[in-house]
Amino acid sequence: MKPLSRRIYAVSAIVLAAVIFVGVNIAIDSTFTTDRLDLTDNGRFTLSQGTRNIIADLKEPITLKFFYSKKVAADYAQTRAYADRVRDLLQEYAALSHGKIILQEIDPAPYTPAEDEATADGLTAAPTDSGDVVYFGLYGTNSIDGSAAIPYFSPDREAFLEYDLSSLVYRLSTPKKPKLAIISTLPLDTGFGGMQAMAQGASQPFAVYQELSQTYDTLMLGQNFTSIPPGTDVLMIAQPGPLNDQQNYAIDQFVMKGGRVLAFVDPNSELAAAGNANQGMSGPSSSSLPRLFQAWGVGFNINKEIGDLELAQRVQTSGDPRNPVSIYPVWLHLTHEQFDAHDPITANLQVLNLASVGDLYRRKDATTHFSPLVVSSDKAALLDTEEVRLSQRPEDLMSSIAPTGKQYVIAARISGPAKTAFPDGPPAGAEQAEVKSAKDINVVVMADTDILDDRFWVRTGNLYGKQVAAPFADNGAFVENAVENLMGSTDLISLRTRATNDRPFTVVQNLQAQAQAEYQQEAQALQQRLTDTQQRLHDLQQGQGERGSSIAMTPGQQAEIDRFKHELIDTREQLRDVQHNLRKDIDALGEFLAFVNIALVPLLVACFAFLLAWLRRRRRARAIPM
């Protein structure tokens, strides 16, 4: 037989390879429906175990209707790409649920029943340049008429997509919301403008309260409460006012009977102070629970707050473009190194932004276990709260901190056996059914209430008439994690913090802190010298002007003025040198990185190309027969 030509072999090989490629893809697509390869540092595109637990715990089927205006949005590449990701993720949810999640995709084309359905389900219509609208949202229902919706998938919350979807599924799977009672002098549910301002659109609830109210049946207790409502699962206390004996007893007995408490106290609440100054509120600027803390074994000094040289935030303090920021040691930027990696409340946190925080400690007479959750660095010290309130210059606070080498506790979990705060019996007017001790209480305490302040952790914007919150820190996640953990669930905890990973330029931050510490004292001395010289020169010139321009200055006076002018110029030059030294190491690092990116990498590629060419040439030379 005549052998086949090489061309036929080549064509046959190509056809066979194409058949194998298509067959393998079909086999993989039908077999590995939920498998993914995620090479991101934090597994951003891999479903967390919390999501898998929520899906696995579904008892009844739920229906998810994904509304997406496919044709109208075809010209918007960013929306189209985001919609593909949402669709893929929803399909993965449905595949993992084994039929418990029924996914429907609906294209609400203009003037169709599908568009009416999207409107009836409360979805948001985003206008386009052509005059049409785009629907891009999700509506879910369960078997008992419960419903939940994501009106529009905002690009600002793309990083929180898995949390938003899992939270919606979780709410549909638990139609009866757990009860969360709140005691607070802060208007968490209305904002500082109050109910009237909120009704007029001039105020809105705190972002953390809005998040909590979506998942829990929240109830704000008035300042005159006398008992904790029956059925309360968790009691949250935030910046409480002075409590009378009956109120302390109600909280005490709630804890003694197994109730869980999340408490936020503060030696210097900047959030409360701002409300008092701008909104005419009368709430306390500092808060504590002294009688209850004593029974729970918690120590807290209401007159001291933490100043931390390492965790201090950089804040805007002046309009000088050459030196616009200062390091403010009582505003703290905490990262994972300050969090307990073993407690579910803090294990996944990445960033907390706090202000004017206090110090918690275990009392010597405590019978409870005291487990720190959030701590300062070891370059911290305690400052007098009154000194901080009166200080106008961050530099003065920085210079007053003498680090003790101790890590101060900002938040802690209190557990184990505890005795009542009322050993002599209930106060007058209180219930007589008394519990004297408990085998195991469960309380979480944080010595800061500014964690609840929106400006420290979330950016809120308006998207087609809807408020959209995009967190940049994990303040809200800490609160929600704590409530959920005290409720007895942890499935959503691992999802809240995945998108707020803080990846700062730590080398630059360390250089800044080192330079600030090294040159700050010299810069302050030069600045004071500059101010004094300017004042003396001004006094001389002012005095000469008062005597009249017709009187000539003596040579001695003119020489003194000239000397002050030269001293002024010399001081300014020294001050510029010091300010330049503050940035020289950072600038050198920037120049090195620029060299690496612009020149070094191309040089290495060129060297590799030359080496490869030389090796090939040498190989060819060896192959040529002599």
Image (cartoon, rainbow, N blue to C red):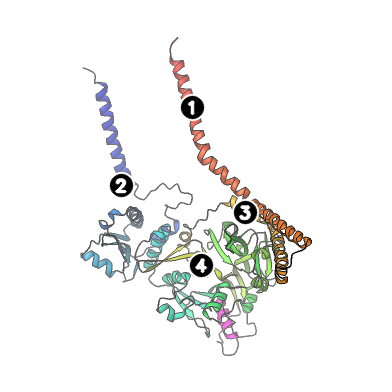
Q: Is residue 505 left or right of residue 215?
A: right
Mark 1, residue position: 610
Judge whether residue 275 is colored magenta.
no
Mark 2, residue position: 30
Label 2: few (<14), some (14–19) or many (≥20) C-alpha neighbours in 10 Å: few
Residue 386 figure quarter: bottom right
Label 4: few (<14), some (14–19) or many (≥20) C-alpha neighbours in 10 Å: some
Label 1: few (<14), some (14–19) or many (≥20) C-alpha neighbours in 10 Å: few
Q: Residue at x 27, y 56 (%)?
A: 70
Residue type at mark 2?
A: Ser
Residue 587 spot, x, y in % from top left: 59, 48
Earlier along the polypeptide chain: callout 3 or callout 2?
2
Element assignment for label 4: helix
Mark 4, residue position: 455
Q: Is residue 485 visible?
A: no
Q: Is residue 568 left or right of residue 210?
A: right
Indicate whether 602 appears above or below 193: above
Camera-side residue: 459 or 622?
Answer: 459
Mark 3, residue position: 512
The outermost residue toward the bottom is: 429
Q: Main secondary structure of the magenta part?
A: helix
Residue 149 spot, x, y in % from top left: 34, 67
Which residues make up the magenta segment?
A: 242-257
